[in-house]
Image (cartoon, rainbow, N blue to C red):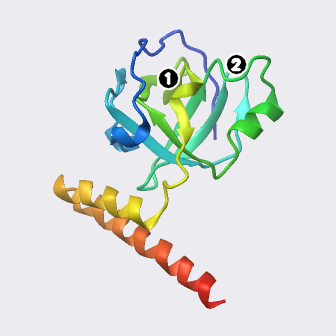
Amino acid sequence: MVSTSQSWNIKPTSTSITRPRQLKPVLIKDLQIGTTHRGRVLEGRVAEDPYFVSSAAFLIEDAVGDLVEIAVYNNIPGASWSATERSFPKGRAIAIREPFYKIRADGSPGVRVDDPAEIEDAADVNTSLSWRERGNVHFRAKQFKDALHCYEAALGVHASSCQEIAV
C-alpha cells in the first residue's frame, strides 16, 4: 500500500554536482531518519507504477530487496499522471544523489527529492559487475548476508544471459 503525505521538512540545499558513480552506495536499511546522506547515492529500480498527487511518488527496490517510497517534488511543470508514468516507469533503474530520508506528514518514512536533477538513470544497477562491486563493499564491512545476496544476484545475471545465448 502506498500512502500520500505532504510535509514542509525539505532537504537542505546542496551545491554538490557529483555524478552518482563518484558517490558511495547506500542501502535503504542504512538510511537514517532526518539525514541528508552527503557523499552517498541510493540506487534501485522503480518497483511499482507511480502515482501523482502533489508529487510523483513510487517505491524503489535496492540491491538487497528492501523497499522505500520516493516522493519527487517540482518534477515537471504542469505535471500530470501520464507525465509521472513516463518519467518513472516500473522497472526503471535510478540513482538518487545524496538522498534525504525523513518522516513524512503521515508518520511514515520516505525519501524526499526536491530537485529532480538529483535523480539519474542507473542503467547498470543490475549488471553482474555492479552486483559484484556491491557485494565486495558489504563483504569488507563484514555484512556477509548482504554480500551473499549481491553475489547471488551477480550469478543470476550471468545465468539469464547464458539462457538468452543458448536459445
Give residue 49's quadrant in the image.
top right
Q: Where is residue 153 in the image (x, y as percent from the top left)?
A: 43, 68
Label 1 sits on what residue type?
A: Gly
Label 2 sits on what residue type?
A: Ser
Q: Is residue 161 above or below residue 67?
A: below
Q: Is residue 2 above or below residue 116?
A: below
- Can residue 27 be spotted in the picture? yes
Q: Name the residue under label 1.
A: 107
Do residues under tags 1 and 2 come within 8 Å of each other at their CB atoms? Answer: no
User: Residue 51: which disc?
Assistant: none
Give residue 52's quadrant in the image.
top right
Which residue sits at x=34%, y=64%? Answer: 132
Which residue sits at x=61%, y=90%? Answer: 166
Name the mark nearer the viewer: 1 or 2: 2
- On the rendered structure, is 14 left or right of 141? right
Q: Mark 2 points at which residue?
A: 54
Q: Is residue 113 above or below residue 95?
A: above
Q: Where is residue 68 in the image (x, y as percent from the top left)?
A: 50, 39
| Image quadrant where one finds the C terminus | bottom right
Choose the circle earlier in sequence order: 1 or 2: 2
Q: Where is residue 152 in the image (x, y as percent from the top left)?
A: 38, 71
Q: Is mark 1 on a helix, strand or loop?
A: loop
Q: Nearer the viewer, residue 59 or 154?
A: 154
Q: Nearer the viewer, residue 81 or 126?
A: 126
Q: Where is residue 61 in the image (x, y as percent from the top left)?
A: 51, 49
Give residue 119's quadrant in the image.
top right
Check the image and name the residue furthest to the bottom: 166
Q: Which of 93 and 57 is in front in this view?
A: 93
Mark 2, other Cα within 10 Å: few <14 / some 14–19 / many ≥20: some
